[in-house]
Image (tube, rainbow, N blue to C red):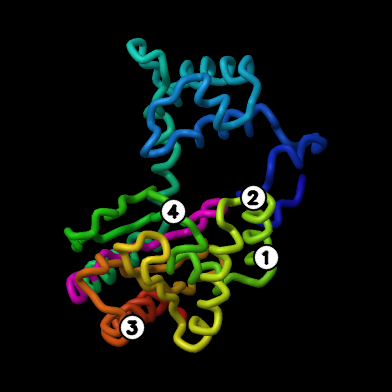
Amino acid sequence: MHSISLPGLANPHDLSQDRQFSMNLARGLEVLRAFTPLDSVLGNRDLHNRTGLPKPTISRLTYTLTLLGYLNYDERLQKYRLGSGVLSLGYPLLSSLRIRQVARPHIEELSRQTGCTVNIGIRDRTSIVYVETCNVDRGNMYRPDIGSTRPILTTSIGRALLLSSPPHERDAVLNRLRVDGAPHFEEELKHLERDEQFYAAHRFCYSAGDWRTEVHAIGAPIRLPDNEPQVAMNCTMSAHRLGTSTFQKDIAPLMLETVRRIESAYGIQ
């Protein structure tokens, strides 16, 4: 079997000569990933533009995915939406993530103490995807939901996860971003380089509006057993409600104590 060093970072085009790799399956999944919360309705032309796949291939894939229930076709718009089959695929993963059940009472308490929105996230390719969240900051217009994603370099949770990862994993993620030509990559990399010494000294990362100017956040990794995914936590709040000193002096200690409690529940000291 082909060795996968870091799942999610493979480029299908790089594996075209791998006889074990199913290019048709990879293309179908790329079509599903083309849909976003902001672009939830897409036609074949949209999917062609987003994936770069040939138009005949797109037509076959959307036809197949619709028959299987992973896409729904809107006759009026003559475009597609994600179908319930996609949701059914994701639920077994969410229900099997023990961190969600273990962390939930702790992040609820932290959210009540601080007034912050508190989230737990894991890496998905070169992004962070939230797997648990507790929303109390009604002034935060970017209040997340489970399954929503955030960039890895401009968020405190993303940098915390990256800086706590083994060097070879961190290098693999950064290389993927560089190779993909991520917009503003060099500029965003400066956020990580700036946070590296801060994280080493304080064990958390701080984002003073790096992702969105009106949202500030701190993030820290959570150590889990080797058979669990790498996860991190953040506390976010609308910038107008909180100053930098309050975030770092008052909220950060509470967040780090919450991290320790979650780790202790796993028997990690």
Label 4, label 3: how far apart the Cα atoms are: 24 Å
Counting from the top left corner in percent of width and height, residue 56 is at 63, 15
**What residue is pinned by disc 4?**
129
Where disc 4 sits, the SS reads strand
Label 3, label 2: how far apart the Cα atoms are: 33 Å
Label 1, label 4: how far apart the Cα atoms are: 20 Å
Location of the C terminus by quadrant is bottom left
Counting from the top left corner in percent of width and height, residue 237 is at 26, 67
- Nearer the observer, disc 2 or disc 1? 2
**What residue is pinned by disc 2?**
181
Where disc 3 sits, the SS reads helix
Where disc 2 sits, the SS reads loop
In the displayed structure, would residue 172 be above or below residue 89?
below
N-term mark: 4 or 2: 4
**What residue is pinned by disc 1?**
171
Residue type for callout 2? Gly
Tell me the residue at 37%/39% (across/down). 37
State the residue in front, 55 or 258.
Answer: 55
Residue type for callout 3? Gln
- Nearer the observer, disc 3 or disc 2? 2
In the displayed structure, would residue 208 be above or below residue 94?
below
Mark 1 Cα-neighbour bin, 10 Å: few <14, some 14–19, many ≥20: few
Residue 248 circle label:
3
Label 2, label 1: how far apart the Cα atoms are: 15 Å
Q: Are marks 1 and 4 in contact (CB under 8 Å)?
A: no
Where disc 1 sits, the SS reads helix
Q: From which residue to which does the magenta span run? A: 111-127
